[in-house]
């Protein structure tokens, strides 16, 4: 048996002997909800109780760094340096999760207790992001145990605040720029395009959240006594929303439309499957006309209303409400001037007679759009290795449709980013019943073992 086969067998055995499930179970058991009342001390127990043992096995020298943002959770950084002449790979992951949503899961499922049902592993964080970075760590361990070296240097960043906008991550990368200096980021988050085909993406869409509010007075007033003479905030807000996108979701603000849907990007997107999801039927008439669904997802911008409020829908009263509010979001790709998103919206609303609609941006969670060049040498290298292992073409997309703090790495550390997701679209990420199929995780572990092996092999190794 050649050494690579031994490394792959080591990874395969971690499933057959139950080690992977046991380790993932221990990670899921640690409650790491960064949005609610979990303390920083509880969050960083994920480092000491969850990750430290495997990081020690990998020979990574680690240290916990206090966050530069007050009351935000600390970071874990580390390195394994084999030689100054070798390339250095940076690994990123986040251990925090969205809220558990207790009581909303399938009967018999407890979100912080891993459970296998019908060959699927359920638990909060299984897909986002505990299961994904565990795959990468165990793949690295299989290579190291077999070859006694990785063949490259390894640096790590783990955070516990990604779900609340990665507070302090940019400051960390700036402060520790020399320590974190690497040749490439290879990390895992998000879903594959298709469950049975490896995916690579090179960045992420950005996101800007903001609130629109129509507020005219204090207190509600009887709709019979005052209807027809008091301005209704719900009506005004509804009309304001209608001038941002049309009835089919097409964006109506010119400065919100990107300039980066090039022929090269279109070419990559044309090779993707036309079916977005097997379980959820999409509306192909929604959004920017004359674009394919994949072009809309990965190459264009989208506007969403995340929440609406005017009065209490569960306990309505016959009254004109004093105010109405909408929580809105723009997802955007590179080629969009993010600094002008809000000012463009203000000018657009004012021009169309909606100066009474306030735009509130305080405490919004914003991510920048970023994308590594599709002609990058690291993409070429990784794509070749993954396709050889997979036995066919893989899916390469310019960026994830969702958002990640990817520009920390592209803009501050100035390195290319290669993301290889180990999840799929129907994983119920951020929702009750979060899960991943065992078959997908097994394939991902073998895939990453092969990738790390080939990235670190010398000409004399087979």
Image: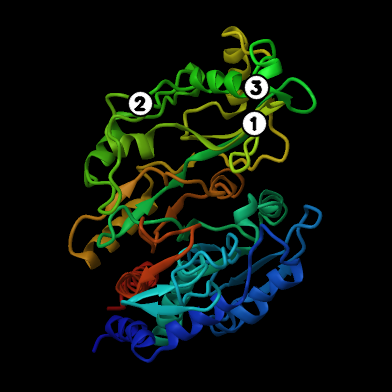
**Position of residue 246 in the picture relative to residue 34 (left or right):** left
Residue carrying label 1: 325
Question: What is the C-alpha distance between the residues marked 3 and 2?
Answer: 29 Å
Residue at point 37%, 50% (across, down): 377
Question: What is the C-alpha distance between the residues marked 3 and 1?
Answer: 9 Å
Name the residue at the front extreme: 224
Q: Which mark is residue 233?
A: 3
**Closer to viewer: mark 3 or mark 1:** 3
State which tag comes first along the sequence, 3 or 1: 3
Residue carrying label 2: 288
How many residues crowd mark 3 within 10 Å: few (<14), some (14–19), many (20+)?
many
* Front residue of this view, candidates 408 and 251: 251
How many residues crowd mark 2 within 10 Å: few (<14), some (14–19), many (20+)?
many
State which tag comes first along the sequence, 3 or 2: 3
Q: In the rendered view, would you say 209 is above or below 400?
A: above
Judging from the image, what secondary structure is the residue with disc 1 in? strand
* Front residue of this view, candidates 166 and 57: 166
Name the residue at the bottom extreme: 17
Q: Is residue 457 visible?
A: no
- Image spot of residue 215 (x, y percent): 72, 23
**Closer to viewer: mark 2 or mark 1:** 1
In this picture the colour scheme is rainbow
Judging from the image, what secondary structure is the residue with disc 3 in? helix
Residue 92 falls in image quadrant = bottom right
């Amino acid at each position: 048996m050649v050494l690579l086969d031994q490394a792959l067998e080591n990874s395969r055995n971690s499933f057959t002997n139950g080690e992977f499930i046991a380790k993932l179970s221990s990670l899921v058991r640690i409650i790491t909800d960064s949005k609610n009342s979990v303390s920083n001390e509880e969050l960083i127990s994920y480092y000491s109780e969850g990750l430290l043992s495997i990081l020690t096995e990998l020979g990574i020298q680690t240290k916990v760094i206090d966050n530069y943002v007050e009351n935000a959770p600390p970071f874990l950084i580390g390195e394994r340096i084999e030689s100054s002449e070798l390339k250095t790979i940076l690994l990123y992951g986040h251990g925090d999760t969205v809220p558990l949503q207790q009581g909303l899961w399938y009967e018999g499922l407890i979100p912080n207790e891993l459970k296998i049902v019908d060959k699927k592993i359920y638990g909060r964080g299984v897909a986002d992001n505990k299961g994904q970075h565990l795959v990468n760590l165990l793949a690295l361990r299989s290579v190291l145990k077999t070859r006694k070296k990785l063949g490259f240097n390894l640096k790590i960043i783990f955070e516990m605040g990604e779900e609340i906008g990665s507070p302090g991550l940019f400051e960390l990368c700036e402060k520790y720029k020399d320590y974190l200096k690497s040749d490439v980021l290879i990390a895992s988050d998000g879903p594959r395009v298709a469950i049975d085909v490896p995916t690579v993406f090179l960045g992420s869409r950005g996101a800007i959240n903001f609130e629109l509010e129509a507020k005219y007075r204090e207190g509600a007033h009887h709709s019979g006594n005052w209807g027809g003479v008091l301005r209704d905030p719900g009506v005004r807000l509804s009309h304001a929303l209608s001038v941002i996108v049309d009835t089919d979701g097409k964006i109506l603000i010119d400065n919100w439309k990107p300039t980066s849907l090039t022929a090269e990007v279109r070419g990559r997107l044309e090779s993707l499957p036309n079916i977005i999801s097997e379980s959820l039927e999409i509306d192909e008439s929604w959004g920017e006309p004359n674009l394919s669904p994949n072009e809309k997802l990965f190459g264009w911008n989208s506007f969403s209303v995340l929440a609406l409020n005017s009065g209490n829908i569960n306990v309505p009263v016959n009254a004109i409400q004093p105010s109405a509010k909408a929580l809105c979001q723009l997802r955007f790709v590179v080629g969009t001037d993010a600094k002008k998103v809000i000012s463009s919206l203000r000018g657009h609303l004012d021009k169309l007679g909606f100066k009474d609609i306030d735009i509130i941006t305080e405490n919004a969670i914003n991510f920048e759009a970023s994308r590594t060049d599709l002609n990058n040498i690291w993409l070429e290298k990784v794509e070749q290795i993954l396709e050889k292992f997979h036995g066919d073409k893989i899916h390469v997309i310019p960026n994830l449709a969702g958002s990640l703090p990817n520009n920390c790495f592209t803009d501050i550390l100035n390195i290319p980013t290669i993301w290889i997701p180990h999840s799929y679209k129907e994983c119920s990420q951020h929702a009750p019943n979060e899960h991943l199929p065992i078959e997908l995780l097994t394939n991902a572990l073998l895939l990453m073992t092969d990738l790390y092996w080939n990235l670190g092999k010398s000409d004399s190794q087979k």
